[in-house]
Image (cartoon, grey):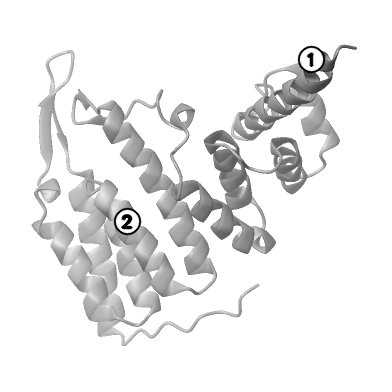
Amino acid sequence: MSIFSFWANPEKKRNANIELAEALLSAQTLPAGEKGSRQIEKIMKQCSTRQAVLEKVIELCGEPATSRQRYICAVAYTRGKADYRDKAIQALESYLANSPYEEAYKNAHHIWGNKSLSADDERKIHLADMYAHLGKAYEDSHAFSQALASYNKELELTPFDAAAYCRISSAHVKKNQMTSAMNILLSARKSHYYKPIKYKTASGDTVTDDTFKKVIDNHIIDLEKKIENGYVYVPKKRK
């Protein structure tokens, strides 16, 4: 074996393992019978639990040094058991502190009404999703101030997503800050995104999308009931 081969082979193996880790992570979300290659199916059979698959993904990914590795680790830890929560926070923070992994979002095809969103919008949606995961991890850890900071960054990136407002409101409820919880929902109601969107389909039919309005209105009704009943959030013991 030449000196070149000696140094090249370990790098080739590392890249192959990262490729396999990402493929294995993607296979987790596929229906049974659509897991992909025989190698993937073999690993899935060897791993007795969903958690075991995630641990294999993390092992194959290796120490995260690239945006791709940081993304794979962040998603794997996020999908993991409650014991992974602190590691999930660390991995998500690391991912969001660096350049995003372009392959994670460049082929996404979100639409607004009947218009496809731009590549920059897809990048923002991807980052917003990662901030939502981070906020959830903090919220599950009862670190509600950090959860709010993450959800607010999510909202900055995707102000057209009603779920972002609702997550912020929910975090305020868990801090027993009912006025703040209601205010964020009322701010969503004042947003121009609250107004239903009307557009024509390719066949010429007129469609009205009032999803944003319905989600916000339902959360306002739910919160009004909580306030009326004197709701007080008491955190459960962390698992």
Relative vertical location of residue 103 with respect to residue 141 in this rendering, above or below: above
**Does residue 224 appear anywhere in the picture?**
no
Relative vertical location of residue 179 with respect to residue 12 in this rendering, above or below: below
Q: Is residue 201 left or right of residue 237?
A: left
**Does residue 115 appear anywhere in the picture?**
yes
The answer to which image quadrant residue 39 occupies is: top right
Q: Is residue 64 left or right of residue 133?
A: right
Q: In the image as oriented, which residue stretches furthest toward the front?
A: 3
Mark 1: give few (<14), some (14-19) or many (20+) Cα within 10 Å: few
Quarter of the C terminus within the rendering? bottom right
Q: How many marks?
A: 2
Residue type, mark 2 in image: Lys
Viewer-closest of 15 and 129? 15
Q: Which residue is mark 1?
A: 4
Viewer-closest of 193 and 88? 88
Q: Is residue 83 left or right of residue 96?
A: right
- Residue 59 is marked as none
Q: In the image as oriented, which residue stretches furthest toward the right?
A: 1
Q: Residue at x 44, y 60 (%)?
A: 135
Identify the secondary structure beneath mark 2: helix
Identify the secondary structure beneath mark 1: helix
The answer to which image quadrant residue 88 occupies is: bottom right
Q: Residue at x 50, y 74 (%)?
A: 142
- Residue 153 is marked as 2
Quarter of the N terminus within the rendering? top right
Q: Residue at x 36, y 67 (%)?
A: 148
Q: Residue at x 38, y 80 (%)?
A: 175
- The spot of residue 48 in percent (x, y) is 82, 42
Counting residues from the start of the chain, the first of labels 2 and 1 encountered is 1
- The spot of residue 90 in percent (x, y) is 57, 58
Q: Label 2 to label 1, Cα distance in Å? A: 46 Å
- The spot of residue 83 in percent (x, y) is 69, 63
